[in-house]
Image (cartoon, helix red, strand yellow):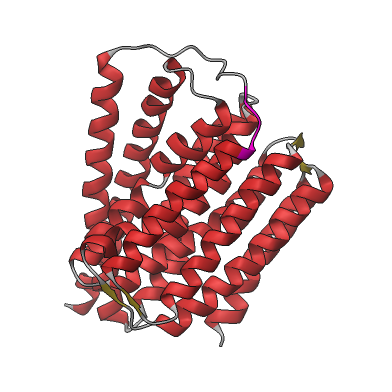
Amino acid sequence: MLVLEAIAALLAFIFGLFVLIYCSDKAVKHSVIIASAWKIPPILIGLVFVSIGTDLPEIINSIIASWTGHGDINVGDSLGSAFTQITLILGLLALLVKDFKVDKKEILIIGVCEILSLILVASVVEKGYISRTNGFFLVISWILLMLIVRTLTKKDDVYEKKGEKKIHHFIIAILGFLGVAAGSYILVESIITISTLFGVSEYFISFFIAAIGTSLPELAVDLNALRKRQYEIAIGDIIGSSIVDATLSIGIGPMIFSNVLSSGETAFLTAIYAVFASLIVIATLYIRGKVERKTGILFIIVYLVSYVIFLHA
């Protein structure tokens, strides 16, 4: 009976991830078409529209996990995704596409904002409790960070692809969002079941396993953007998604339903390591001024070191 429950939970986990990835792709694709029709600059399309779109799994997971009283899943998935995207996903992208240059000024500005967002999270989760006030503060901090980025970065040329102002893009985007919500619910429930059956911390399952799954939309969307030479959208999404995860995503659930963390100390330590990893990534991109295979390998190594540190601690 236990084996059947475990198989059912694993299948539900896989199915939930599939629904999340598929629906996220549709929601992001049609949201970007709408944004481009409104002549929104590419760096902002990446930072705001695409990053929120690809982070829908984490955002909905935050709400559902908080609602069901599983704060460890909220923080583990969101913080794990922020860390995974800035290291593993960016590293894989560097290996899968040819080298490309980045704007050092933009990297420095959005990179500092990303690091600040992780420091904020570390200060919040250390207490082992995220109140509604803390959640509200994290959500507001995302808005403030986006305003800072928009103010300090140069004005960009509008996104090259002309968008179509057609109602069906809105409809498909909304259906995509609803699909993400359904997939997130299935994913959260499967994590709870797996954690109970195998006696593994919900935080670790969320941080190391679920975070990879919910980061796949970034990999798919940004790989497609890089192949189309839309470099600013891709970089804006990767770093922007990490900012969203560390602020809006973690905060939106507790803003409605306060969170209690049974793994507060672990969450704090992983947040500190995520800050350290981000410093390496941002400093490397700023100094070299480009994304290349050598840096990609470095970012992946930084990601893998976390397994050695935390899973064998």
From the viewer's perspective, tell me whether residue 215 is left or right of residue 286: left
Residue 61 sits in quarter: bottom left
- Percent across and percent down for residue 234 are 58, 36
Tell me the chief SS of the magenta region: loop
Along the line of sight, the residue nearer the viewer: 253 or 296:
253
- Give the image location of residue 144, x and y in percent: 47, 49
| Image quadrant where one finds the N terminus | bottom left
In this rendering, would 90 be left or right of 20?
right
Q: Which residues are magenta?
A: 152-156
Question: Which of 224 and 130 lies nearest the eye of the viewer?
Answer: 130
Q: Residue drawn at (50%, 36%), measured in percent from left and top? A: 221
In this image, 48 relative to 134: left or right? Answer: right
Residue 48 visible in the displayed image: yes
Rendered-image quadrant of the C terminus: bottom right
Q: Quadrant of residue 129?
A: bottom left
Q: Residue at x 77, y 48 (%)?
A: 286
Q: Is residue 92 visible?
A: no
Residue 157, by quadrant, is top right
Establish if 307 lies above or below 19.
below
- Residue 285 locus on image (x, y percent): 75, 49
> Where's residue 295, x and y in %?
76, 52
